[in-house]
Image: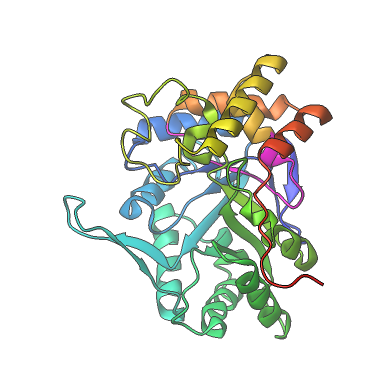
Amino acid sequence: MKQRTVGRSGLTVSHLGLGTWRWGRETDADEAAALLVAFHDAGGTLVDTAVGYADGASEEILGGLIADVVPREELVIAGKGGHRFVGGADGADVQARVDGSRRQLLHDLDVSLRRLGVDHLDLWQVHVPDPSVPVEETLSALDAAVTAGKVRYVGVSNYSAWRMAHAATVQAGKPGYAPIVSNQVRYSLLDRSAERDIVPAGAELGIGVLPYSPLGGGALTGKYRGGIPSDSRAALGGRHLADLDDPATIGVVEAVATAAEGLATSPIAIALAWVRDRPGVVAPILGARTLGQLTGALVSETLDLPAEIRSALDDVSAPAVSITGNVS
């Protein structure tokens, strides 16, 4: 698998990443082991997790596989802190809790390291911005983590362009700072909002984009064209799924399917190849739940989209542009 650097840093990762947010919920330890082995065998190195995934089960499963299944030194482990879901044991009244304080972030980091059974993370990101905490305090946790040797590189996730630029500017003004090298955001043929300002700002600031939900929550796989399968994310009320009834969504899904037929490949490969090779993108994060899904996604590794196909997909997925106010 090809390798890319993260932003303007020296950190090198595979240009596809393996996401683990389903591990411990929809994916058990045995299936997770099969996923990790297949990803590693394909040359993948970047594995994405977070302290809040599956109430910690995701990190615990990954920790149990490191060394026993795949050597630690052959992985680039990216973690996140400052966000988790809390609620009843039966899943009722689950709510997101965001805490970007220095205390909570450093606590989350220690918890992640313990669950994973490692002494450092290669990349550690603030999972979501916390407007109630001064950005200087949040960023001080990143600096402290790097200084302590618990983290090699730092980044953010779900940050708007102005928040990302603000954080990067604050960091750049401090001696011995840990620069922001990544921003993990939603990005696919069905959601190109990151192109408006996050991608160009990242290019200027040396911050790489790590797209999550690169298949629109599964909509771009084409599996919903004939209805909703009973075991699908839509049937189970999954997150990050595009609006299946939106005419714009339908148009993009059909265009991807047509391109796949023309190139004798899968819609998954088409959609992943498109976002993988967008300007500023480092590595789309694959949220595969099963080995079969991952195998289908890895087909994109050998696919380079012809210019005419890429142009057609650009056109059909172009975000609507609205202009308000005075133009001069």
Q: Nearer the viewer, residue 308 or 272?
A: 308
Visual colour scheme: rainbow
- Relative to 80, residue 284 above or below: above
Tell whether 326 sits left or right of 101.
Answer: right
- What residue appears at the point 63 percent right and 33 percent down from the top-left corner? 271
The dominant secondary structure in magenta is: loop
Question: Residue 6: x, y in percent?
Answer: 71, 55
Residue 114 higher or lower than 72, as above or below: below
Is residue 2 visible in the rendered structure shown here? yes
Can you say which quadrant of the picture contains the N terminus?
A: top right
- Residue 146 counted in the magenta span: no
Snapshot quadrant of residue 215: top right
Tally the numbered discs: 0
Is 287 colored magenta in this rendering? yes
Residue 306 visible in the snapshot: no
Residue depicted at x 43% and y 81% = 132
Q: Residue furthest front?
A: 326
Residue 308: image location, x then y, percent: 81, 28
**Residue at image x 57%, y 55%?**
185
Quarter where residue 257 is shown: top right
Depth check, front residue: 42 or 69: 42
Query: Measured from the top left, where is residue 134 in percent x and y?
Result: 51, 85
Residue at image point 34% right, 35% down: 28
Where residue 226 sits, quadrant-wise, is top left
Does 90 appear above or below 248?
below
Residue extent of the magenta highlight? 274-289
Q: Quadrant of the C terminus?
A: bottom right
Q: x, y percentage for residue 141? A: 52, 77
